[in-house]
Amino acid sequence: MPTDSGPHGENEQHEIRGSLEVLFTLREEFAQWVEEAQDASKKEALENVLAHIEALESEYRIRQEKLK
């Protein structure tokens, strides 16, 4: 299992942290768009995208925990 000691582990931690920041921003934006959606089909499509972003965020958090 990789550790955070050494350049590879440290780089991976930075990459994961950056990815989580981007996913957080996307999740916030899509959540707002879901609330503002007027059309049921648009709302469903946005909810699907939002669910995918949340799943990716969860996977990155798991990876982050494994590096600790």
Image (cartoon, helix red, strand yellow):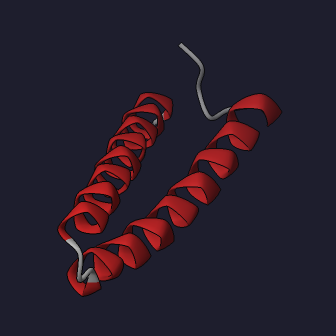
Tell me where residue 58 sits by quadrant: top left
Q: In the depicted view, which residue is nearer to us: 35 or 61?
A: 35
Q: What residue sits 37% from the left and 75% below the top?
A: 28
- Residue 42: give x, y in percent of width and height: 31, 66
Q: Is residue 18 left or right of residue 26?
A: right
Q: Is 34 drawn above or below residue 1 in the view shown?
A: below
Return the x and y of residue 31 as percentages of the image width and height.
Answer: 30, 73
- Residue 19 image position (x, y, % from top left): 59, 53
Q: Residue at x 38, y 71 (%)?
A: 30
Residue at the top extreme, as displayed: 1
Which of 23 and 16 lies nearest the eye of the viewer?
23
- Tally of numbered discs: 0
For the residue pair 39 and 44, the one nearer the viewer reads as: 39
- Residue 14 in the image: state x and y as whole percent: 68, 51
Q: Residue at x 28, y 49 (%)?
A: 51
Name the residue: 27% across, 80% down: 37
Left/right placement of residue 56 relative to residue 12 reads: left
Residue 16 versus residue 6 in the image, above or below: below
* 30 lies above or below 51: below
